[in-house]
Amino acid sequence: MMNIFEHTRASWVRYSDYEWQEAPDGYFYLLPAPDAAPSIYDPTKVTNELVLAAVEIGRSLMGGTPPEKGRNLIREFAVKYGLLGIMTALPTTANFFDYEKVYFPRNDFIREETMDTIAYLKHFYPFKMPDVKKKRTESVWNSRDDDDNAMKALMLTYSGRLDPQAMAMSFSRNYGECYEWMVSVFKDWAFTLMATQIYYDKDDPANAATRMVYESGMAAFEGNAPTYHLELRDRPVIVWDFHSLMLNIKMMLDLMMTDENNPIRLCKQCMQPFLAVDNGELFCSPQCAKKYRREHK
């Protein structure tokens, strides 16, 4: 069968620097630094390093990393890859501005099934709200910023018919993501890989109760899926639309976990994520293999 992910629209924006700011409610948000320059890249060109970095941060956070260190790890990730795009990942559609309200599938952050659009935006603009006028399905976003030519260029780039308005808004300098929410996302990725590996561990098989826990836990991460559209090129092709880095990583992680030849794994000794050379490989290096065998004689 053909590679269904051969064609994608997955460009993403990262700023040269980010900083944590504490909002009046006491929560920390990660935003682009005031003088940081934006740039555009394609996450699908760095899939392996992107997913490995995300899982490693999640593994570290699951191990009880102090908040200060956790914030530093996430900031360094954002400098390389950008923010996660949680705002466009959570709703049932990234085009939520085209509807009267924002609609949500089950998730860890928004308990309501629907929410007023402006109320939803407040979760991601803790210091300065965008100039948005919304009436039923009609919306107007005044994105003019006479002092920021880079921002103008970004808005022009992502103002086409195939890019949701919310995606462009998530690249603005005032857009931020809450530390607690980001921690939860990174932990979910690490849990997914860890639970799968333990579930199938032949050397240390889990009991029936434990297996049931992991099965239930895995089912909780249903999440959203990327959308697609048909383009007429030299032949008709399916083009996948990744409107958030969060969904991009989730989809790529799932594909890497189910790869029959070179799956992503956690090293059986040091627990670092790595790409296996073959499906039976369990260690990230010969050194870890020797150490494990020496300790488990």
Image: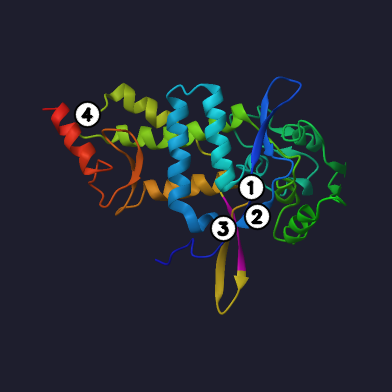
Relative horizontal placement of residue 253, taking residue 36 as reference (left or right): left
Q: Secondary structure at mark 1?
A: loop
Q: CA distance from mark 1 to mark 4?
A: 44 Å
In contact (CB < 8 Å): disc 2 and disc 1 = yes
Q: Nearer the viewer, mark 1 or mark 3?
A: 1
Region of the chain picked out in magenta, as a range: 226-230
- Amino acid type, callout 1: Ser
Q: CA distance from mark 2 to mark 1?
A: 8 Å
In the drawing, what numbered circle is on residue 39? 2
- Considering the image in quadrants, where does the N terminus appear? bottom left
Residue 259, given in percent of the width and then of the height, sits at: 35, 52
Q: Secondary structure at mark 3?
A: loop
Q: Secondary structure at mark 2?
A: strand
Check disc 3 and report the residue beneath it.
Answer: 42
Which residue corresponds to the image point at 25% horizontal and 34% vertical from the top-left?
Answer: 201
Sequence-first tag of 2 and 4? 2
Which residue corresponds to the image point at 55% horizontal and 35% vertical from the top-left?
Answer: 74
Q: CA distance from mark 2 to mark 4?
A: 46 Å
Sequence-first tag of 4 and 3? 3
- Amino acid type, callout 2: Ser
Q: In this view of the protein, which residue sits in the foreground, 229 or 187?
A: 187
Q: Quick one: label 3, few (<14), some, or many (20+) residues within 10 Å?
A: some
Residue 154, given in percent of the width and then of the height, sits at: 74, 56
In the drawing, what numbered circle is on residue 204? 4
Check disc 1 and report the residue beneath it.
Answer: 16
- Amino acid type, callout 4: Asp
